[in-house]
Amino acid sequence: MGACPPSSKVVKQAIQWLLRLRESGHAPALRLQCEQWRNADQAHEVAWQRVVSLHQDLDLRAIAGANVALQTLETSQRRLHRRQALKLLGGVALVGSAAWLGKDLQALSSWTSDYATGTGERRRIPLPDGSLLQLNTRSAVDLAFDERQRLIHLRQGELMLTCNAAQGPMLIRTRDTLLEGFDAQVVVRQDADCTRISVSRGQVALHRPGDAALHWIAAGQAWRVDAQGPHLLQQQAMDANAWTEGLIVTRDMRLDAFLAEVARYRHGYLGCSDDVADLRLSGVFRLEDTDKLLQLLPQTLPVLIRQRTRWWVRLERLA
């Protein structure tokens, strides 16, 4: 079954541990005590992961005044409900940050999810039935595992699921569709206007609400599900599985689409001028350092990098 939401008391304890570790410089003895607290109860670990994820997504260390919000949470005499804590943290972040932070605040839905990742983070999660769930950057899922079903609800972002067939069908629900697989490996991505599905092993059944037809996605196929329905994609400009290895692999991909993909793994604004948006690139790019990745582009494309701050980067045509 999915992890139970932690109580406000446990969430407050997790915030206190985070503050103590930061103030001590992550002293080994204190870090060990924190690990013992996390291991003592599943609710402790769930609360810890959500507090750390929220901390990373807001980039609190770079936002003036955000630490004051954490200190307020720590010293408050009343228990803070989760929504109150989010309102306080979000309010301080919006006051003390630039406009680009609005995009990153979308990740706050991870606060109420069973598992989530922050910006640039990827996670591998072994499931109780032996299946493997992997989450890409800025992703959030809920699990519903019981004697009747095995269901993963993708709330945002992207996942790869390697199914264990022995336990019966595995279900993946997104905003646009319900997927069913037995012995398969599938990548599912929920964008603002569609859900993308790519199957690399086995086959997956696609159910769409209100549609009596059942579509089967075979290994090697990629589909898009949007308001017009499911569509088989004939070509893909990017390897759908590469992110699990920390890579972006492109094939004749537009520069503006490539930059939009890289932007998922970093904070701030990343874009390009209209006169270079249609430039094409193919290659293998490593994600662990997106600044270094961007420095490679002027070596193969007629562009220059204009950087106003750490969080504002734009590519323009080389004069």
Image (cartoon, rainbow, N blue to C red):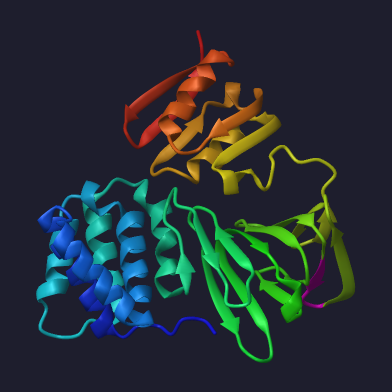
Q: Where is residue 162 in the image (x, y as percent from the top left)?
A: 68, 63
Q: Position of residue 142 (x, y in %)?
A: 54, 75
In this view, the residue farthest toward the bottom is 147
Chief secondary structure of the magenta portion? strand
Question: In the rendered structure, which segment of residues is drawn in magenta?
Answer: 204-210
From the viewer's perspective, tell me whether residue 29 is left or right of residue 204. Answer: left
What's the residue at 46%, 81% (across, down)? Answer: 3
Residue 134, above or below 85: above
Which of the pair 133/104 is nearer the observer?
133
Residue 206 located within the stretch drawn in magenta: yes
Which of the pair 125/303 is nearer the observer?
125
Q: Position of residue 141 (x, y in %)?
A: 54, 69
Corner quadrant of residue 88: bottom left
What's the residue at 9%, 75% (across, down)? Answer: 75
What's the residue at 38%, 53% (across, down)? Answer: 102
Q: Where is residue 171 in the image (x, y as percent from the top left)?
A: 70, 75
